[in-house]
Amino acid sequence: MAEDSQPTNDDPAQGTEDPAPARFLPAFVWRASRDGRIVYANPWACLYLGVPYDKVLGQHWNVFVYPDDIGFVIDAVRQMTGRTLLRNVDVRLMRADGVFRWHTLHLQATRDELGGIADTVGVAIDIHECKHAWELYEASERRLQAAFQGACMGAWEWDMKTRVVRMTAQLAKIYDFPEGTDAVMLAELTERVAPAYREPYQRKLDAVLQHHAPFELDFLLDERIAPQRWLRMRGHPEYDHEGFLVRVYGVTFDISDHRIHEERLSLSERRYRALVESTGAMVWSATPDGSVRPAGGSWDDFAGVDPSCIAGWGWMELVHPEDREMARESWQNALRQKTTQSLTFRLRRKDGVYRIVEARAAPLCDQNGNLQEWFGTTTDVTAQYEAKAAIEARSLRLRVAMQAAKLSIATLDLSDWVLSIEDGGDRRKTERVPYVAALQRVHEEDRAALDRYIRRLANGEKPSANFEFRLNNSQPERWIEGSALLQLSAAGKPMRVISSVIDITERKRLELILRESSRRKDEFLAMLAHELRNPLAPLRTVIALMQKDVPLGEREQDLVGLMQRQVEHMTHIVDDLLEVSRITQGRIALKREPILVCTAVYHAVEAVAGMAQARMQHMHVEVPDATNWVFGDVTRVSQILVNILNNAIKYTPEGGSISVTAHADDAWVSIVIGDTGSGISPDLLPKIFDLFSQGERTLDRSEGGLGIGLSLVKKLVEMHDGRISVQSPGPGRGTTVIVDLPRLHHQERHSGATLSALDEQPEAAVRRILIVDDNRDAADSLAMLCETENHVTRVAYSPAEALDVGQEFKPDVALLDIGLPGMDGYELARRLRKKGETTPLLIAITGYGQAEDRMRAQAAGFDLHFVKPVNVESLLKALSSRAA
């Protein structure tokens, strides 16, 4: 109907005449006045309502509308505002038989002169069947969606021209697309396949689409989308009349649970098959009455007879005659009891040898408990029986050995902390003691450490492998050593601590004896070195006096030089003995500082240059990089290099060559000292760093030495975090020693350690010098040496004599031996110079040269400390340069 409100000749609003078009319409048509009274109804409406025309006129339209739908009509009329005078609304109209049917009501209104609604025309089209069909469709759709959700299934359609995939909400959820996604590109689906399956998935899909037939594919989604989500796709392709693929439609559903069940079933089958094969069991079944049915190949391999010969009760022919009746009775007993049975007997193998087998049979019943069949296995257990016998024999031997060794097994159950102790491995002699009570048996000094060890082990930590403790109140003292491990349960929780303990009292006694012997050896070495220094001191002093005397003849010079070299050699040996003893006892502390490598090398070469010249040896030094630094003790680094050079000079013949080179990389500085000397034999090379290790020596021992030099060097290098190696092609072919020290990466300039003595002073002064030493030769020779420098000396051979001489002599300098009888040098120093005074200058002359000896001397008031045999030149410089 038109929206124009102007009346026409056919407009029913002008009266009740019957408009021609409405009369023939197969639809419900009426006109209602402003107050809702019907002023016209077409014949179809009267027929539908079952009311004559004259009865319809004047009735309100809401009489024929379903009560719940009246509000929808009123709302539609109210919404006719402005120029919008047309509205549609679905309502139910009552038919003549009283049934309400759905209609689509098209409403059109006209306006009066004031612009209000004058009357309304309604045309109702019957949509009841369509509405019912739509409701059925919606219900079907809901059921389908519910089925899709319940089956984790989604539907899809691929448009192969646009490559667009339309999908249901359930499919979007399966693929983990955002909610509301109903279409994606086909490539997006492929990208969501697990990378390992993507290429096979695409290849299989291309293959199945070429067959023009429905297909089915299984694949795994990417782990980043959903872990272990398996999908199954079922699709149907459609092709046009030219054979081109137009679209593919189908469903995809989640088969993860199904896949898991399949894998579990497959794994169970594989496990069963592997279990049977690994045990070597012969599988068989039997009817309820006990008639055996062998299951194939394993029986053939064992018995070597046709399975039909074994079927029924024929297997009894293979049983050992002595076991046959017992086997028959046991099997019949199992048939009567219908319970799982196990039987061991001897069965003949195809080679005629009887083997011990174990047969197990289990009844298989249906859900009602009725026996259906028997399932059984027969396993060759000969090896197990033999192993059991061997284990029992070994256990017996082990128990005897444990008893002989006095070894016990202690087991601590962590559930109740009760300790079980098996004496000598015999479980019949087991003692159970609460842990706290057992701990009281341990010596009180060892109790806390042992308890801490056990509790750390029980907590899953890993303390040291062994523990030791003493027993409480045991005379003589008893020592116990043990080792323990933690046993965990199947769930990984600590269950028990198992330990083996043994009495090590005798070993401890021997260890104490050895330790005491080692201590005495170290004390002996130190005392030997000290005692050797005493005679060396006057010898060195006398040599210095002889060199200061009137010019000597050539023969006398040779003799003095010989004595000087031998004294220096003895001094070197004594120093090495002391150094080894100190390092072994851990009594050396390094005073580290940056050291310029070239300085250390040149100082070491300078120290041994005289010895090399005396043997007419050629020495080549090449240290190209002057910026290489190491971090170490200046004195000890020099000692390392000097010792190696001394060895090179000693074992290189006259006229030979010695080379010293240095190079560096980012981590290490390498100092290489090579010679053309006697070399090292292959059998000695692995032991070259062992203490007192020596190669073959001549009877005259012209090359001397105690075999401690390289041992000392190696210990010093390792104390510097370095490494040392010795290489030699063999005897007579020279030796190469390589020392690697960690490189120091900075350019801070530190002066290298100088090996010279005190700097000389421009002017010397005459001193009054008191010399105190109970060794008369040492004291007298030292006095004579000082007098050659025009000093005035007095000698005392005991502390009492020194005190008397000191009061009268008033010395400027006192040279005191430390190891004096009756009163040591420290106490004598305190009495000679009272606290706060500066004279006399106190100088210690002693055979004790360790760091603690120097510190003790300093604490006692000594100004200088010299170790016997004294470096004469350094001592004289000190006397002439220090103020009185």
Image (cartoon, rainbow, N blue to C red):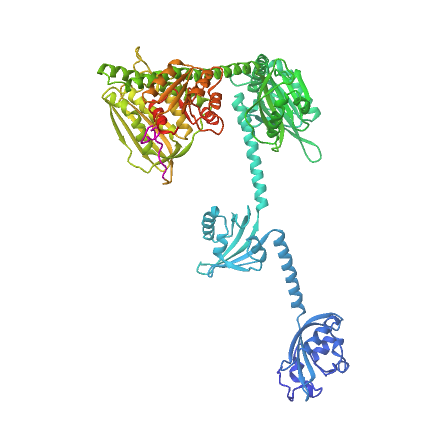
The spot of residue 542 in percent (x, y) is 32, 16
Total count of labels? 0
Q: Is residue 706 visible?
A: no
Instruction: Report if residue 762 lies within the magenta region.
Output: yes
Q: Which residue is the extreme one toward the front?
A: 808
- Answer above or below: position of 603 versus 163: above
Q: Nearer the viewer, residue 425 or 736?
A: 736
The secondary structure that dominates the magenta segment is loop
Q: Is residue 600 visible?
A: yes
Locate residue 561 relative to residue 821 in the image: left or right: left
Instruction: Report if residue 834 lies within the magenta region.
Output: no
Query: Residue at coordinates 36% horizontally, 31% vertically from top-left?
Result: 740
Q: In which quadrant of the rendered image does the C terminus lie?
A: top left
Quarter of the view holding residue 796 = top left
Query: Residue at coordinates 37% horizontally, 20% vertically from top-left?
Result: 793
The spot of residue 720 in percent (x, y) is 41, 30
Quarter of the view holding residue 733 = top left
The spot of residue 19 in percent (x, y) is 67, 85
Q: Nearer the viewer, residue 801 or 339?
A: 801
- Answer above or below: position of 775 versus 23: above
Q: In which quadrant of the rendered image does the N terminus lie?
A: bottom right
Q: Nearer the viewer, residue 46 or 150?
A: 150
Q: Which residue is the extreme one toward the top?
A: 699
Range of magenta residues? 749-764
Locate residue 290 relative to residue 511 in the image: left or right: right
Quarter of the view holding residue 701 = top left
Locate residue 105 relative to residue 189 in the image: left or right: right
The spot of residue 163 in percent (x, y) is 47, 59
Q: Nearer the viewer, residue 735 or 837?
A: 837
